[in-house]
């Protein structure tokens, strides 16, 4: 079962993470239920770049035929080059949380808060690691206690 849910706020609790959705609904996720927490980089799709490029070339051709001025063609071509270079540099980021049951929770991350989100993901991973160490130590102590008794 793969679900895509968007949340707006994420906070770290003692036993897991707390997600707050747009509907003000809260969901507690335990560290034992988490499979992966990661950040994705989303670039603009190639089809959109090709569409803007074709539209700009069409606009330049129309202006050249309609106005019969070479300067307009040059300006339109330079505009196309500028737009393509700017779009190639554009990136958006996303925070994804995947559970062991296949559910995926997503949040779009601004470029300005990217570093803050990376630190938060590292904190979550550290807590997951500490949780696993704690559980394995408890299991080891339990096994040692049972072997003594």
Image (cartoon, rainbow, N blue to C red):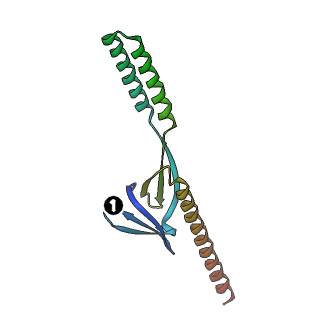
Query: Residue 13, how many percent across, how many down?
Result: 49, 73
> Which residue is found at the position 53% from the left and 55% from the top?
38
Of helix, strand and loop, which one carries label 1?
loop
> Which residue is found at the position 44% from the left and 57% from the top?
102
Query: Which of the pair 11/64 is nearer the observer?
Result: 64
Q: State the image quarter where residue 46 is shown.
A: top left
> Which residue is found at the position 65% from the left and 78% from the top?
140
Query: Residue 9, how many percent across, how many down?
Result: 42, 63
Quadrant occupied by the C terminus: bottom right
Q: Is 52 situated above or below 112?
A: above
Q: State the image quarter where residue 129 is shown.
A: bottom right
Query: Residue 31, how many percent across, how many down?
Result: 51, 69
Query: Residue 11, how many percent across, how many down?
Result: 47, 67
Horizontal side, residue 40 vs residue 63: left or right? right
Q: Is 3 situated above or below 70?
A: below
Horizontal side, residue 19 vs residue 120: left or right? left
Q: Which residue is mark 1?
A: 22
Label 1 packing within 10 angstroms: few (<14), some (14-19), many (20+): few
Quadrant occupied by the N terminus: bottom left
Q: Is 69 situated above or below 147?
A: above
Query: Which of the pair 1/143 is nearer the observer?
Result: 1
């Amino acid at each position: 079962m793969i679900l895509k849910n968007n949340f707006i706020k994420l906070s770290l609790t003692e036993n897991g993470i707390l997600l707050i959705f747009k509907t003000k609904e809260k969901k507690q996720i335990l560290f034992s239920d988490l499979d992966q927490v990661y950040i994705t980089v989303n670039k603009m799709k190639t089809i959109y770049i090709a569409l803007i490029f074709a539209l700009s070339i069409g606009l330049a051709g129309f202006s050249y035929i309609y106005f019969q001025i070479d300067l307009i063609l040059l300006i339109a071509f330079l505009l196309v080059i500028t737009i393509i270079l700017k779009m190639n540099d554009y990136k958006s980021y996303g925070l994804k949380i995947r559970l062991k049951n296949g559910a995926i929770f997503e949040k779009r991350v601004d470029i300005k808060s990217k570093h803050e989100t990376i630190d938060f993901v590292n904190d979550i991973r550290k807590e997951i690691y500490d949780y696993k160490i704690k559980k394995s130590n408890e299991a080891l102590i339990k096994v040692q206690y049972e072997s003594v008794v």
